[in-house]
Image: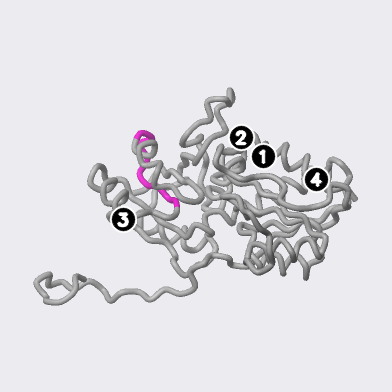
Amino acid sequence: MPRLSEVIAALDALWPPERAEQWDAVGTVCGDPDAEVSRVLFAVDPVQDIADEAVKLGADLIVTHHPLYLRGTTTVAAGTFKGRVVHTLIKNDIALHVAHTNADTADPGVSDALAGALDLRVVGPLVPDPDDPAGRRGLGRICELDHPETLREFAARAAARLPRTAQGIRVAGDPDALIRTVAVSGGSGDSLFEQVRAAGVDAFLTADLRHHPVSEAREQSPLALLDAAHWATEWPWCEQAAAQLDAVSERHGWDLRTHVSRTVTDPWTAHAPSEPPLADSSTSGAPN
């Protein structure tokens, strides 16, 4: 079995920490470098449910996409929910490692996994990494469909292939518009509208789309927008990342098993759909 320091070195080779954004908090949060690692659990969020799952599984290491302490802290007291996660991990000899924005822009990265889940053909990065001579790294991906679909059909594809959440898929655009090219970005993506418009794609699928950026984007172009749950757009990376570590483990001859958490850590738990819009816009009361 490899030591934690050896596994971390492999993870850092896959997602170099120096490629993370300056504001990010990636790397190892806790763990003994000399401890042996036999089981690794991949998840999106380092929350208590994931820590408890790791204890039950007998995992020695959790790898998450989201940081535990993004903005720093002055305490790991168990009276705080993040402190309780740390206490659970340390008491059970479980390490925690984070790959966040360094995994977003990797090759393959988070958006490659999202495109793969949707069965899209990746053409290249949406925002290329200027330090990548091969032109494969970067934020988001520009993709093509094998066959054109209506926006309605593509939204149904996304809803069926991404993990089920309370939100589902929100859509802005003509349901009958034909979609041939799509930009995708795992996680929050409404800061990328300028690059998406420049790419000339028919649709953009991401998460956390806000009212004003969407309204302005729709006024400026016929670009169709699909808004999925943040967690759902990033979960496919867990499977991709586990497969990458499996390949490293096989090359090194390590006795290492990887697991992907199926625990839904999306914070939204229910959805109450509105009534269908009324045909008569003069009806009094709240807008429909």
Image quarter hosting the C terminus: bottom left
Q: Residues within 10 Å of mark 3 (few under 14, many from 20)?
A: few
Taking the spot 57% from the left edge, 46% from the top edge, the residue there is 110
Say which of 237 and 94 sits in front. Answer: 94
Q: Amino acid at mark 1?
A: Trp
Check contact, mark 1 vs mark 3: CB within 8 A: no
Q: Is residue 140 magenta?
A: no
Q: In the rendered image, which residue does mark 1 sit on?
A: 15
Mark 1 vs mark 2, CA separation in Å: 8 Å
Q: Earlier in the sequence, mark 1 or mark 4?
A: 4
Residue 174 location in percent, x, y?
27, 55
- In the image, 154 versus 258, the foreground residue is 258
Q: Position of residue 59 (x, y in %)?
A: 79, 61
SS for callout 4 = helix
Q: Quadrant of residue 286?
A: bottom left
Q: Is residue 282 above or below residue 70?
A: below
